[in-house]
Amino acid sequence: MITGHERTMCLIGRARLAGKMRTFGRLMKKWMLILSGSLIALGTLFVLMDRPNLWLENKGANVIAHVETLGEYPTTVLHIQIKDVSSGKIVFELVKEEGTPQIHNFSLSVGENPVNVADPEHGSYRVVAPAGGNKFVLRPGTNYRILVWGDGWLPIHANIKF
């Protein structure tokens, strides 16, 4: 037969165990939230930051925009845009039309430039700006911003001035 004292000790033990389990449960919930939040943040960063490399090689009146990976492999480039920094006007813009266009680099020069500056190994581009034109003009003394998008949401950019 269980005495009153034993019953009380049993209830106290259960209460202590229940309290420890609640504390453990709260800790597990906190750790799961922290872990989930960290994984979501890392995934978001990966998606946002998946950008190609971009470095500019200045050759006087010409600039070569390099986007290759490890200096020699073509890189997936889905969107290229050149803006006049002072006015914000888009001077030139290419977007992916089909496939997965991959390029090594593209050349720009002072004056008229053909809209087919990027010749992809795979896929193709569609010219957005200049609309209906086959050339765009880069003027000397004007600041331009080159924006290049890869698979991520954010572009990489560099400024040039001829």
Image (cartoon, grey):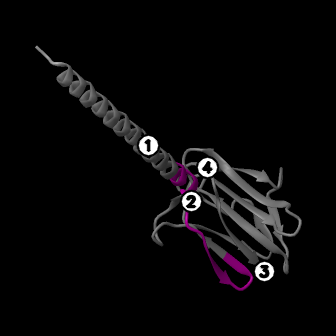
Task: Name the residue: 37% across, 39% down.
Answer: 23
Q: Which residue is mark 1?
A: 30
- The disc placed on residue 101 is none
- In magenta, the rendered stretch is 44-63
Q: Are marks 2 and 4 in contact (CB under 8 Å)?
A: no
| Sequence-earlier tag: 1 or 4 | 1
- The disc placed on residue 162 is 3
- The disc placed on residue 124 is 4
Task: Name the residue: 68% across, 77% down.
Answer: 63
Bin the neighbour count of mark 4 within 10 Å (Cα to Cα): few under 14, some 14-19, many 20 and up: some
| Sequence-earlier tag: 2 or 4 | 2
What whole-number distance in Å separates the C-alpha atoms at marks 2 and 4?
19 Å
Task: Name the residue: 82% across, 55% down.
Answer: 130
* Number of the front mark, 3 or 2: 2
Q: Which residue is mark 2?
A: 51
* Number of the front mark, 2 or 4: 2
What whole-number distance in Å separates the C-alpha atoms at marks 1 and 2?
33 Å
Please name the amino acid that badge 2 sits on.
Arg
Quadrant for residue 26, please give it: top left
Task: Please tell me whether residue 155 is drawn above or below residue 2 in the rendered image.
Answer: below
